[in-house]
Amino acid sequence: MLEAIDNKNLTALILLDLSKAFDTVSHSILLHKLSCIGASPEAVKWFQDYLTGRYQYVRIGSTKSSARPITHGVPQCAILSPLLFCIYINDLPGSIQSCNLDSYVDDSKLYKSFCIYDLEQTTINLEADLQIAAKWCLELQLLINPEKTKFLVVGSRHMLQNVPTEISLTFLGKTIRPVLLAKDLGINLDSYLSYDDHISKLVSSCMRKLCQINRVKDSFDNETLKLVIETLVINKLLYCSTVWSNTSSNNVNKLQSVQNFACRVISGVGKFDHITPALRELNWLPVEKLLLERDTVMAYKCFNGLAPDYLVDKFIKRSDIHDRSTRNHDLLDIPLYKSAAGNQSLTELQLIGSNLPYQGHLLHDGTTFCNPMWSSKDANVSCIQLGYPGVNVEQWNSSYFGNIGSLSGVRTLERRYNCSGTEGSLQLCSQAIGSEITCEKENAISVTCQSYIRLRGSDIPLKGRVEIFHQGTWGTVCTYNGESFATSAQVACWELGFNDAVQHGRWESPLVSGKIWLKDVKCWGDEKSLVFCPHNNWKYTGCGHYYDRYVKCSICSNGLLEDTASFPDSVFNASAAQFPDFGPSSARLYSPQPWCLPENHPYENQFLEISLPGIFSLSAVATVGGDMGYVSSYILSYMVSGYSWKYATVGTQKLIFGNTNDETHNVIRRDLDFAIQAQKVRFTPKTWQRVPCMRVELCGREIPRCNPPNIMVKNITSNSVLISWLPLRVPTKTKTLHKKYSVTITSDVEQHIQYSNITELTSLFITNLIPYHRYMYTVKAIGLEECFGEDFPLQTKQAGK
């Protein structure tokens, strides 16, 4: 059920109640089954003697009925009875067709995991299998009680919100509706598998027992008292802990309070005294470590074949997956889990500095690291801790992801690790050394991890065949129904670090061979990875590469340059280029090849320039290189016609860090510190690998001018001026005249005059100016959304003229 939740599925769980199960066992059927499983005739005869010749009678007061022979049932409380009953019903699971059925003696449960889309069909399957189970029980003279049969739908809170409230099952003429809580083998299950109700009732029960023991504790010596409490309380407290040990820390704290009280009862420690020394004296581990110890013992049993097969089968060595001789050959293959339900602990380690989620600077508790001895093994462990399969071996330490000096509160401290490469976190590495020695922020450690998804088969950035990394191998995703892949395409783009999916479909060429990992992926839209979405079983898809899927992603919701009608090739210009294949017009992000400077050409101060067909507000830019090379840092300058060039900044720095490799889909987006207003933008490469090559995208929108038309200055004197204008028509359907304006005059001697909310006027007389002085003035409409207001020069006359 946890794995189903982890895969965004629900589980229907039906707890069957057998009425008088042990008392209704048919002796003749049981003896026949003993023969069928290989019991010798002598053994069968022995069991016949064991079961027959028993009598029962009823007594009311002093009156007794006559004794009657017992022809059905196995003796209650006899050591052989559970085994005999298991033999009696051992073929029940095999009769079930669509669902799974597990039994522990007379407690049986029917369950089936399903996607919410398949709810109706699952209900039909459950009812059909319930009828099969009821018929099978009737043939064996057993009776299922529909009144006491419980039905739970188990899933995450988000998934359960999508389950219709009117869902029900019809069984033996009764309507069974889902319940929120049910008890199974002493565990109180809830629909979320939070075990909150179980822990609350357990704590309450144990506290009552401890209070009773506390009243009579003076009757025991300490050793006996400890034995009584361990037997009656602690054992009850930890009953089936391997099932619910992944409960919340709040519940663990409740259990710890019970253990603390038990310790105080034995040791006599006061209510406000520190409890840890008393726990040590009793040789009691804290509850959290007790749970870990019991889980570890269970894991040891599973790993060594000492546990039931259904648990042992969950422990798979890497050698069971592949026969390659590696240093990790005999280690366990750790499955990837996506949620708390999958028992994945959230790591405090983060990556910053890149829109691509699998690469960046390592950040832990507001601190980045420097390490002169940082190795690929250390990098591999950091990626494992972050939830990735490992480090990208080709790029594990080749990237720099921008300046982090502007991030508030971030320090860079020296950290040294001596990892073997297989630990689950950096903290588990031997000889991990930390210090308060600060480092230069430009030396902060960065990594590029192996992602679980990539795009392949296309020279166009952000577009390609979807491939999934699983069990050390890349494989494709196939789907017969293209429409059902729409949300999955969005999740794929988000996982890659991009904005959204703008296109998806069947990948036509070139077709590939090799693995097909996933089929019919149906994402909800809130998954972090495509592999976390509901899908058919891994590998065994029954699907061909003809149905492989591709996606085309966008880097931002307001990308401009793909619109070739508004931004024709003529808007691109460059100081130099490799014509014709790598000319300036190749610089569009979705172009199959980039703009490149000529080989053996002076690269300093060369640029790519884009002239925009209007004034645009730009909030972000994106870049990617190509096979010939890429730009790792650049300067972005911008201007409006008639004004000087200015510089955009990222992290308060003029130097913007670009791409980290020449991979086609390594598109790096940089959000600017503030939106710039520009008619021209210019990319000037500052550092690069091999040859400076770029494909770019601008994220923004066109903005109107704030200035009203026909702005004029009249009657200029030494200390006054008259400024007039015509009303601005508001860019709406009615084209109404705007009524509110502001006039601002500034000078280089810090004189600043502003008049706001000028209503119903189209001119303004301004006084108190400095004689023979140069000013800049502007008139802007007030209340419009973002717009561009141009400034104009003005000079007053000399005094006396």
Image: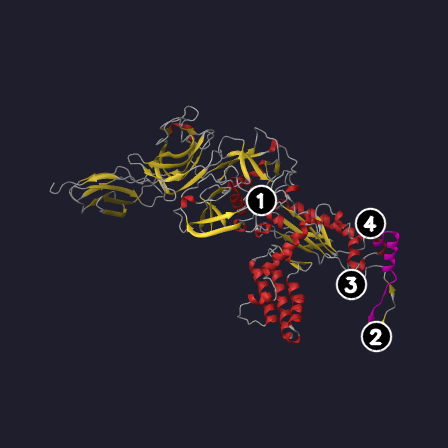
Prevailing secondary structure of the magenta residues: helix
In the picture of the structure, the residue carrying the numbered disc 3 is: 77
* Disc nearest the viewer among 3 and 2: 3
* Disc nearest the viewer among 1 and 4: 4
Q: Quadrant of residue 255?
A: bottom right
* Disc nearest the viewer among 2 and 4: 4
Which sits earlier in the primary sequence, circle 2 or circle 4?
4
In the picture of the structure, the residue carrying the numbered disc 2 is: 62
732 with respect to 74 (left or right): left
Which sits earlier in the primary sequence, circle 3 or circle 1?
3
In the picture of the structure, the residue carrying the numbered disc 4 is: 37
Q: Vertically, is 255 above or below 120?
A: below
Q: CA distance from mark 2 to mark 4?
A: 46 Å
Q: Position of residue 759 (x, y in %)?
A: 28, 47
Q: Which residues are magenta?
A: 30-59
Which sits earlier in the primary sequence, circle 1 or circle 4?
4
Q: CA distance from mark 3 to mark 1?
A: 47 Å
118 with respect to 91 (left or right): left
Question: Depth check: 729 or 432 in front?
Answer: 432
Q: Amino acid at mark 1?
A: Phe
745 with respect to 376 (left or right): left
In the picture of the structure, the residue carrying the numbered disc 1 is: 532
Q: Judging from the image, what secondary structure is the residue with disc 3 in?
A: loop
Q: Is residue 281 visible?
A: yes
**How packed is label 1: few (under 14 Cα within 10 Å), some, or many (20 or more)?**
many
